[in-house]
């Protein structure tokens, strides 16, 4: 069917296989096409948009195995499936520049029918194309951010280039339980090819059930999983609208125009501190109640905060910890919700984590391998925990600092140096991956040696601070100098940007200050050459390709590096990819930077979520775009959740000080239903065999934190010590990583959330205050001052 806004095409089976926006200059197909699946040998035509699965009376049905009646009349397409006891009917029609999708489930029997499972494939174009032309992945693919509630579920499909129009799917009738995903992928990492990973996610809207009986998340009290009961001859109806939106800020307004409440919330709250929401109701709607719910042990605790809503602002002080649910019930009984997290003090969490690492993870001289921090991995990401320990102790020394620092030092000298380098020679890397090594590993190692060099010699026991600075320079030169590599892969990877953007300027400063002029000159030349090349090639966005065909581990660090080197125009280009990558949702966990490989579903990934957040924050410091600042903070809330022992919805609990690298947002995660809405480490996939067996030859060790730590080192140099304010176009003051209380006509008291506050900033106004005070005074005209 073809109308003014969309061009659609259905296959003979009634699935929607083409959906293009006629006002889109790129003519992107917003749904998964069978032609692309065939081109990469993926056999998933049963998951195309509009296919479904259903179970009733012990019988399971998949629409792809059935023959529907498909008719098209006056621009309306009808698809009807006639099952033994029920009928499933879809209607697609265009109206007012939108595509309307009606779903009708009808009981053909005189008696009640129970539908135990019913789920619709809404397979929007969440694709990592197997294509080295990065513009294909930028312009023809979308990140999909779900906001799930009983009556107001929505999916925001954001084009990865961040160039509108984008596409939203909005529920306007019926009840939705959840949104799950299935991941199809190919990874040729051990074939020594790069890029090696491609794949796609298929999204499934769950209307009944969602899980097999033994696969239901045991502790997820937020998202229901229940059957549909239809009386004899009765029907259940759902209505969805697919509508364009220009940019991320327009998504909530589009939803509001379709009858959804619009709620803004702080993604992170703290016990005993007030938290504020803004609530807008759709035209003609009235509020019945606002209930805040959380879990304590096995009990759900409700607080009615309806009377706290004043002028569209809801402020209350949470008393419990962990995930909290704000239930917004309208007068007609329809219900929306927001999920936010309430934490105890972050500095307490950090100190417990460091103690756990040095008391439990550090293997010591008698360990196997000696002096390592477990879990053991060949990948440099596993060493981030060492940098985290060092960075935290630099910011906040304690009585345990020397013991903790010397544990890291012993590991860096005895274990790290001899594992990654032949006989400890920093110019001779070991082929830890069979017949090759990863140059990116060395930026994590260089960071450890650099942070050791920041300590006084009295704190160290094996070498001097200056020696560690020299080691850092040697390792870092290997990371960035292609001339030092004997293989083509090594030469290419040496020119890629990476997480070293976090510390490169500090390293260069210290090399120069300590008189290591030769090292400074070589590294600075390589650094300048790398960023100059990436800046020059920024119209082609080549840094977005890594071992993955499209990767926030590529364009995230590229953005931060370009900003750090004052390559402003190039940084602005890559920053658009960051803004499209960081989620927005009614569930704080679904606001994570978009990534899927480590969970085989949309997920929080501690390391790359944290690095993307740090990249966005560094870009904000140089570009002043508030979308980067707000996105960085949304992403940070998810990262901290991976260290939060107070979570109440997780089947794999953590003791204080433990951490998990990955959280599967999807419910269900159809590749691994046991991981749905759960935290874990990637080694849980070892039992699936294939590449996972080679990545994790020791199987699932139960240690979920193998690649964690660098993101916390990044956090400690950003939101860990900084609070930001800015004023928007309407003159409203915003505080990020803190709160404001108005105390005068032109004055506010700013309270920081940073655990180790060192600086307050208003970047656009060029106002800063170096202070360790938890509260300061701020005037938009005069700037910051101490109280």
Image (cartoon, helix red, strand yellow):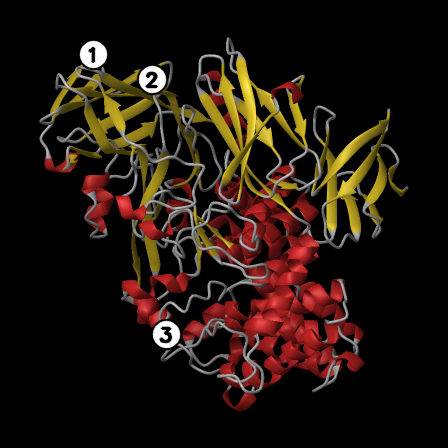
Mark 3, secondary structure of its residue:
loop
C-alpha span from label 3 to label 1: 61 Å
Numbered disc 1: secondary structure: loop
Q: Which residue is mark 2?
A: 4
Q: CA distance from mark 1 to mark 2?
A: 14 Å
Q: Left or right: where does residue 258 sit relative to residue 560?
A: left
Q: Which quarter of the picture shows residue 341?
A: top right
Q: Position of residue 323 (x, y in %)?
A: 54, 41
Residue 537, placed above or below residue 93: below
Question: Is 663 or 602 nearer to us in this picture?
Answer: 663
Q: Do the CB atoms of the residues marked 1 and 2 lie less than 8 Å apart?
A: no
Q: CA distance from mark 3 to mark 2?
A: 57 Å
Element marked by disc 2: loop
Which callout, 3 or 1, points to the residue nearer the camera? 3
Q: Mark 3 or mark 2, which is nearer to you?
A: 3
Residue 68: quarter of image: top left
| 74, 258: nearer the viewer | 258
Disc 3 + disc 2, Cβ < 8 Å: no
x, y percent for residue 462: 69, 87
N-term-proximal mark, 3 vs 2:
2
User: Residue 306 location in percent, x, y?
Assistant: 60, 20
Relative to 68, residue 631 above or below? below
The residue that appears at 28% across and 39% down in the rendered structure is 32
Residue at figure coordinates x 21%, y 18% from the top left: 231
Image: 431 above or below 272: below
**Whether residue 537 can be seen here:** no
- Pointer 1: what residue? 74
- Callout 3 environment at 10 Å: few (<14), some (14 to 19), or many (20+)? few
Q: Quick one: label 3 or label 1, which is nearer the N terminus?
A: 1
Report the residue at 22% width, 29% height from top: 115
């Amino acid at each position: 069917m073809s109308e003014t806004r969309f061009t659609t095409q259905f296959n003979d089976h009634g699935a929607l296989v083409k959906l293009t926006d006629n006002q889109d200059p790129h003519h992107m197909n917003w749904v998964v096409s069978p032609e692309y699946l065939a081109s990469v040998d993926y056999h998933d035509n049963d998951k195309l948009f509009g296919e479904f699965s259903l179970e009733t009376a012990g019988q399971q049905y998949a629409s792809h195995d059935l023959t529907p009646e498909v008719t098209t009349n006056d621009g309306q397409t009808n698809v009807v499936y006639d099952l033994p006891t029920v009928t499933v009917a879809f209607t697609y029609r265009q109206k007012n520049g939108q595509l309307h999708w009606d779903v009708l489930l009808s009981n053909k029997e005189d008696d009640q029918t129970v539908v135990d499972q019913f789920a619709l494939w809404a397979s929007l174009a969440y694709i990592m194309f197997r294509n080295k032309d990065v513009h294909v992945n930028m312009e023809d693919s979308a990140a999909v951010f779900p906001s799930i509630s009983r009556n107001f579920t929505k999916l925001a499909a954001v084009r990865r280039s961040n160039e509108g129009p984008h596409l939203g799917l909005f529920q306007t009738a019926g009840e939705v339980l959840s949104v799950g995903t299935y991941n199809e992928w190919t990874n040729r990492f051990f074939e020594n090819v790069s890029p090696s990973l491609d794949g796609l996610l298929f999204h499934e809207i769950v209307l009944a059930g969602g899980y097999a009986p033994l696969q239901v998340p045991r502790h997820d009290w937020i998202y229901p999983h229940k059957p549909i009961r239809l009386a004899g001859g009765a029907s259940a109806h759902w209505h969805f609208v697919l509508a364009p939106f220009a940019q991320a800020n327009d998504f909530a307004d589009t939803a509001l125009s379709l009858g959804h409440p619009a709620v803004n919330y702080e993604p992170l709250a703290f016990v005993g501190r007030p938290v504020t929401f803004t609530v807008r109701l759709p035209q003609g709607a009235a509020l019945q109640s606002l209930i805040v719910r959380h879990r304590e042990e096995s009990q759900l605790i409700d607080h009615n905060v309806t009377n706290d809503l004043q002028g569209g602002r809801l402020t209350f002080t949470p008393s419990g910890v962990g995930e909290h649910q704000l239930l917004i019930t309208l007068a007609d009984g329809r219900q929306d919700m927001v999920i936010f997290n309430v934490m105890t003090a972050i500095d307490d969490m950090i100190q417990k984590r460091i103690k756990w690492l040095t008391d439990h993870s550090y293997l010591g001289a008698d360990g196997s391998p000696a002096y390592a921090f477990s879990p053991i991995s060949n990948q440099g990401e596993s060493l981030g925990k060492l940098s985290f320990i060092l960075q935290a102790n630099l910011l906040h020394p304690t009585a345990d600092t020397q013991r903790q620092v010397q544990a890291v030092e012993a590991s860096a000298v005895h274990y790290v140096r001899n594992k990654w380098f032949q006989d400890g020679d920093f110019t001779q890397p070991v082929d830890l991956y069979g017949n090759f090594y990863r140059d990116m590993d060395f930026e994590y190692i260089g960071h450890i040696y650099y942070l050791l060099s920041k300590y006084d010699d009295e704190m160290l026991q094996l070498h001097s601070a200056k020696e560690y600075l020299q080691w850092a320079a040697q390792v870092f030169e290997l990371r960035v100098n292609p001339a030092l590599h004997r293989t083509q892969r090594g030469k290419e990877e040496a020119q890629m940007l990476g997480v070293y953007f976090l510390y490169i300027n500090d390293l260069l400063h210290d090399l120069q200050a300590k008189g290591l002029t030769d090292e400074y000159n070589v590294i600075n030349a390589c650094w300048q050459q790398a960023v100059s090349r990436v800046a020059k090639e920024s119209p082609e966005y080549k840094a977005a390709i890594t071992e993955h065909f499209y990767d926030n581990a590529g364009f995230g660090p590229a953005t931060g590096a370009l900003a750090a080197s004052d390559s402003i125009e190039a940084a602005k280009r890559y920053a658009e990819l960051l803004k499209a990558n960081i989620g927005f949702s009614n569930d704080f966990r679904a606001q994570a930077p978009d990534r899927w490989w480590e969970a085989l579903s949309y997920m929080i990934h501690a390391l790359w979520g944290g690095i993307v957040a740090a990249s966005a924050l560094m870009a904000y410091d140089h570009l002043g775009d508030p979308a980067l600042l707000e996105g960085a903070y949304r992403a940070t809330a998810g990262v901290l959740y991976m260290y939060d022992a107070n979570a109440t919805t997780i089947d794999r609990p953590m003791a204080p000080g433990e951490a998990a690298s990955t959280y599967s947002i999807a419910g269900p995660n159809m590749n691994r239903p046991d991981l749905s809405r759960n935290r874990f480490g990637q080694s849980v996939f070892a039992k699936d065999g294939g590449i996972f067996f080679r990545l994790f030859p020791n199987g699932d060790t139960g240690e979920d934190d193998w690649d964690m730590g660098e993101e916390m080192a990044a956090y400690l140099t950003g939101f860990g010590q900084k609070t930001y304010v800015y004023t928007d176009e309407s003159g409203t003051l915003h505080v990020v990583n803190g709160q404001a209380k108005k105390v005068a006509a032109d004055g506010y008291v700013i309270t920081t959330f940073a655990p180790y506050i060192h600086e307050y900033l208003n970047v656009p106004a060029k106002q800063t205050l170096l202070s360790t005070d938890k509260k300061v005074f701020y005037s938009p005209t005069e700037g910051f001052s101490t109280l």
